[in-house]
Image (spheres, rainbow, N blue to C red):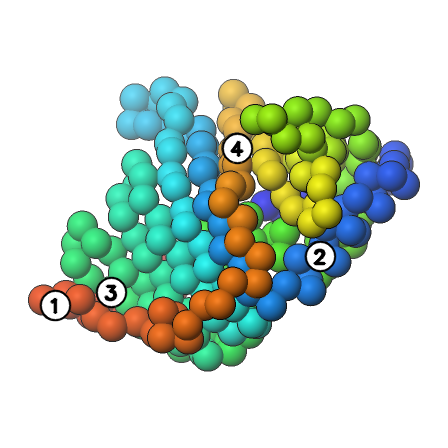
Amino acid sequence: MLCIGATAQTKQQDSLAILLIDRMTDVIGDLESCSFTLHTARDITDSQALVVKQFTQYQVYLSGNDKMLVNAQGDRGHRELWYHAGQLAHYNQEENNYVILQVPDNTIDMIDSVSKLYQMEFPAADFFYPTFTDDLLAHADLLKFLGIVNINGKECFHILASNKEMKMQFWISNDAYNLPARFAITYTSQIGNPQYEAAFSNWQINPNLPMAMFDFQPPPGSAQVRIMAANER
């Protein structure tokens, strides 16, 4: 999850940046369904205290306000999430086991609940919150439009948000949809200023996604296991 962090007293907030963010948020909020690919790179500290990059590719499908499918492959292994009408299934392919959780029957409420209780990550989920603009305004000391840049042959609006704990940059496509194209976070309050970067691609707008694809079916030979809540560890 993106977390903008603590707020400060003095703010510098650009009205054009706010307008662009509002437009992106409104478009996402009006989607009936979507799918996209997300490539992420995060800095982690390994067992030898060295900062190294960790890469993951996510294929994400969302439908309505209660269905989600995520396929994640990368340095942390191959994991899949199925969410539909109050049930979340997490499958670990390497271990061939799965967890079933009873969760709220709304995608945003589910993400909030599971993130807090189990510290499970939902990369880029913040962009799908209807309060995204308000969250930035509440917590960013600086919010500024930096101009138009070209990313892989496509024009994007470049926006910066920062406070004492982190600096966040994100790029919004300069087209009819104004969907997020990329974002990067630098944690300036942490040693070494670790970074988290992500790039969106393959956006599909309002595709016809069969309801059955969001229902989890345990793979042959897989075992159901229990996951401990964060306060139980």
Q: CA distance from mark 3 to mark 4?
A: 28 Å
Q: Which residue is painted at 54% across and 59% down in the image?
A: 34
Residue 36 at x, y = what percent?
49, 50
Q: Earlier in the sequence, mark 4 or mark 2?
A: 2
> Where residue 98 is drawn, which disc sits there?
3
Q: Which residue is mark 1?
A: 220
**Is the residue marked by circle 4 packed among few (<14), some (14-19), or many (20+) residues within 10 Å?**
some
Residue type indicated by callout 2: Val
Q: Earlier in the sequence, mark 1 or mark 4?
A: 4
Q: Secondary structure at mark 3?
A: strand
Residue type indicated by callout 3: Tyr
> Where residue 27 is drawn, which disc sits there?
2
**Quarter assignment of residue 184:** top right
Image side of residue 74 versus residue 35, left or right: left
Q: CA distance from mark 1 to mark 4?
A: 36 Å
> Where residue 197 is drawn, which disc sits there?
4
**Quarter assignment of residue 217:** bottom left
Q: Secondary structure at mark 2?
A: helix
**From the image, which quarter does the C terminus lie in?**
bottom left
